[in-house]
């Protein structure tokens, strides 16, 4: 699946996007984030406060418990404010 990173998540990870194959048993956004944090310091920094990083699965906002089965793209981004 393709992972896309935005704003300071991208800066900390050091990549705009990447193709990954999560290990077997990785079935939710939260499990994916926990696995990503094992991939290095940049990922640890990007996801150190998992509660504030938002995710979208195939362009639809998703909660941490959302299934990633069949996802083509998962995007991660910080909370946004508008005005």
Image (cartoon, rainbow, N blue to C red):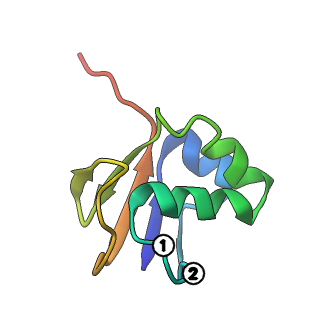
Q: Is residue 1 above or below residue 14?
A: below
Of residue 69 and residue 10, the one placed in the foreground of this image is: 69
Residue 57 percent location from the top left of the image? 28, 62
**Residue 59: quarter of image:** bottom left
Residue visible at 46% across and 68% down in the picture: 3
Residue visible at 79% across and 52% down in the picture: 41
Of residue 24 and residue 54, the one placed in the foreground of this image is: 24
Q: Which residue is mark 1?
A: 26
Residue placed farthest to the left in the image? 60
C-alpha separation, residue under disc 1 versus residue under disc 2: 6 Å
| CB atoms of marks 1 and 2 within 8 Å | yes
Residue placed farthest to the top in the image? 83
Dot 2: within a 10 Å radius of its alpha carbon, few (fewer than 14), some, or many (20 or more) residues? Answer: few
Residue 69 percent location from the top left of the image? 31, 77
Placement of the C terminus among the 4 image quadrants: top left
Of residue 7 and residue 62, the one placed in the foreground of this image is: 62
Residue placed farthest to the front in the image? 25
Placement of the N terminus among the 4 image quadrants: bottom left
Dot 1: within a 10 Å radius of its alpha carbon, few (fewer than 14), some, or many (20 or more) residues? Answer: some
Residue 51 percent location from the top left of the image? 47, 34
Residue visible at 33% across and 70% down in the picture: 68
Q: Which residue is mark 2?
A: 23
Residue 72 percent location from the top left of the image? 32, 78
């Amino acid at each position: 699946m393709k992972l896309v990173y935005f704003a300071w998540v991208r800066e900390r990870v050091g990549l705009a996007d990447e193709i990954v194959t999560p290990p077997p048993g990785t079935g939710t956004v939260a499990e994916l984030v926990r696995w990503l944090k094992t991939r290095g310091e940049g990922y640890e920094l990007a996801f150190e406060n998992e509660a504030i990083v938002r995710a979208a699965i195939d362009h639809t906002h998703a909660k941490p418990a959302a299934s990633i089965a069949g996802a083509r793209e998962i995007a991660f981004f910080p909370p946004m404010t508008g005005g």
